[in-house]
Image: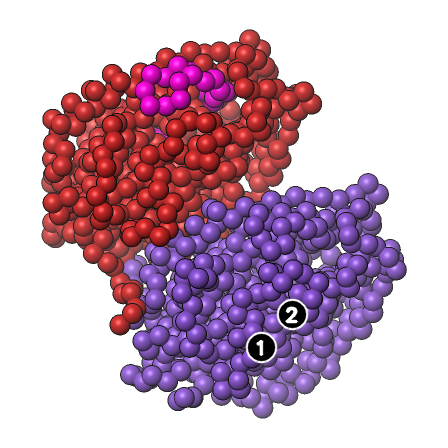
Chain colours: A purple, B red
Amino acid sequence: MVLSPAGNSTTPRRLAESVLAVAGEVTSTEQFDAWWTGCRRWNEAVVRKAPLEELDGWLTDRSTGNIVHRTGKFFSVEGLEVEVAGGPVQRWSQPIINQPEVGLLGILIKDFGGILHCLMQAKVEPGNPNGAQIAPTVQATRSNYTRVHQGKAVPYLEYFRDRGRTRRVLADVRQSEQGAWFHHKRNRNTIVEVEEDVKLLDGFCWLTVGQVHQLLAVDDLVNMDARTVLSCLPLSGDGVSSGQGEDFRSCLERSCAGEHGGLHTTGEILNWITEIRTTTDVGVERVPLNGLVPWSREAGEIAHPSGRFFRVVGVDVRAGGREVGNWMQPMIEPIGTGLVAFLVKRVDGVLHVLMHARVEPGYLDIVELAPTVQCTPENYDVLPSAARPEFLDEVLRASAGQIRFEAVLAEEGGRFFRARNRYLLVETDLAVPPDAFPRHRWMTMSQITGLLRHSHYVNIQARSLVACLHSLLARADTR
Amino acid sequence: MVLSPAGNSTTPRRLAESVLAVAGEVTSTEQFDAWWTGCRRWNEAVVRKAPLEELDGWLTDRSTGNIVHRTGKFFSVEGLEVEVAGGPVQRWSQPIINQPEVGLLGILIKDFGGILHCLMQAKVEPGNPNGAQIAPTVQATRSNYTRVHQGKAVPYLEYFRDRGRTRRVLADVRQSEQGAWFHHKRNRNTIVEVEEDVKLLDGFCWLTVGQVHQLLAVDDLVNMDARTVLSCLPLSGDGVSSGQGEDFRSCLERSCAGEHGGLHTTGEILNWITEIRTTTDVGVERVPLNGLVPWSREAGEIAHPSGRFFRVVGVDVRAGGREVGNWMQPMIEPIGTGLVAFLVKRVDGVLHVLMHARVEPGYLDIVELAPTVQCTPENYDVLPSAARPEFLDEVLRASAGQIRFEAVLAEEGGRFFRARNRYLLVETDLAVPPDAFPRHRWMTMSQITGLLRHSHYVNIQARSLVACLHSLLARADTR
């Protein structure tokens, strides 16, 4: 037979074993702690705000006012005019980052002692609130790996780019990033398993999936790029099942396994997404940053007169670690800490997640599935009350017993300055009838994982929460 | 239990029964013939060429030269500049149709006597080579159903638009159309089953899937919109299996069923698509039609100096049937009959289709999976020899015994004037090693059907061939 089997391979079971190996195999928890302490000391970066006018290498285009790199590469900050027919805010203007190239986010995986390990790195980025964070093996813009910035070669890139190499590709899919701040930005999320020996470089560490999962619960530790790649792991629940219980973890396992069905079939979910994407009228036009009402550029920053939403700021970076020494760049600095939450619910022994079909102006395809709630609560002080997100109160009022996961995690530190969200998994028994909430649907983890094989279905914040929810597969918890 | 089952529903089996019911149930072959003869007589249209300058309701924009409707609705003809790094033709300009709205193509399905039937209509369109063709139940641009053209209401539209109605949605997905002639055009392909009584209007007819399939083999009969919707039927081969044979049909059934695996896993196919989409650099810019080198506007048409590719022409339509009486419009008139072919191959008892990852400038996502060969052979007389499609000679030289299907079918008659392609399914035993042919991959029908649940994977020509290949499920053939 030359045919490859159609059914599940052994990969989900091997991944499940790694999910459960929270104590580590190659790297013990103590060894990780020691390594991490060393990395943080070594990877210091001094980041200072700098006026947009004084950023070396960056220009304000005379006619458009757009902020561009003198090489025309990397990215630019431009204006966007948005019109959402029937939305609570029907029309607005905003600055947005335009970075059309597709970067690579890759995790290299290898079996040690029968357990799959992820090669993770300590990476400093200027927008990180606290210096180094845990990043995927490779996190490279196309400018990085074509060496526009004349930095060093990207380590381990060859495992992802050499097609001739013997390897197993566990996931490979382009996914969107923040559609509120990025115009059509996508990165390639890739997970590759190799059997050959891999040299361990300084600043890198082999961790089981379970170890990385447990680190998700630590504030500001696992970076956004690591979280999105982790969410693409083809975890099916196969190999973690603990039996017939009605406890949270058993319900989560059944949700991942998929064979138990769900409140809606996948066909119904796809029908719902197509309906919303076809009937949502969103007009998006790229416009010059000059004269973008009501934003103003003063004191070296671009800000909204309300003081809300975000600012465009400049930073001056002096890094002491593996990265290029000194550089300056514009960044987006959000105002306030965001709130990102899944409501989850056990239905007939299967955990369901309440997904929200959300419009963001930078999406390539109008609408993506977002967390139940994704917002910065303070922004609604200056917006019409109809704009207040549904289910926000359920999340804000959740009792300690309802909260299954909570951590404050940072977004991309290469473009966003100290952008932090409180990530929450909140259990509920709320009824959410589809007719009353046409833009929300209960989905199983298996359905979400199925959509994650394809581009532009599940947004970046929801992907972070998928990784967090997967991390609960290893938590002993019989409630 | 409130959960819907995750596994296959009974739908594939019920569809398979309809595929095999080639003699009809509600409508016998004789009744169909009589109905169709009547429709053709009743639905006469007189279509004459008219100079672009003399089209009632259409204007040439003074500054851009673009051809637009005076209402700003419907569609426009604009210019496009295309750059494909590393392609055999790296840079070209062309006129293109811009029609950003998403139309609806829907087939209504209903069970009669235990057999599913499709409600098909006889529809005249000005570009059809021969008047009426068999069309889906609903074929409506958004302008149609919002009544911009002030025509009559679209019959049966309510079955697709009223979400409150009791119905089963068998497929609902936005799919691209010709990326060589349309900029970012997509239509919603929807298949809805109802149980309630449906009034049969003049010009409509209930046919089994098998009957429509058999009509695909008749030249210029089943229109493109019907073919693309048919390709989205969730046929799994379940219910058509004839056993263990190595004959063509048994191999096709196994290919549809999917459980027998394939030369590549679906993960490998997705990895291949992501790799190609990430590494193919295509630059597309909408430009004014004015001064689009080397195209010229003379004698009321826009043409390429080589006389090849296509022309933009005007037509004057006087329709005698159900459509609005008289109108004029611009159309694209391709030069020459195209050739569209799948090479198919039995591998370990499973039929495989050789798909081609093809760039077309109008695609929303750079590359889609196209037939093995899709071209107009005469065009290569004026193009570099490297542009000659791979596998063209295998298709042109195929013996009668290799040809499993052949018909000349027309493309969308609402925008394209007498655009016809010779559709071929050619069996081969050619070895196509992936390293030597990086843009081609053997796929099973199950893999193609799986991708057809999602947007922008399988192009319009390949979807026509998928419908044609499905039609062979009912052909007794033991070769």
- What residue is at 43 percent from the left and 50 percent from the top? A274
- The picture places residue B185, in percent across and down from the top left corner, at 48, 37
- What residue is at 25 percent from the left and 59 percent from the top? B8
Find out whether the residues at labels 2 and 1 contact each other: C-beta distance under 8 Å: yes
Q: Vertical placement of B324 versus B8: above or below?
A: above
Output the chain of dot 2.
A
Q: CA distance from mark 2 to mark 1?
A: 10 Å
- What residue is at 13 percent from the left and 27 percent from the top? B31
Q: Which residues are magenta?
A: B317-346
Residue B34 shows up from this direction = yes
Q: Badge 2 is on which residue?
A: A377
Q: Vertical placement of B38 versus B173: above or below?
A: above
Q: How many marks?
A: 2
**Which of the two discs, 2 and 1, labels the residue nearer the N terminus?**
2
Question: Would residue A220 be found to the left or right of residue A401 on screen?
Answer: right
Badge 2 amino acid: Pro
Q: Badge 1 is on which residue?
A: A396
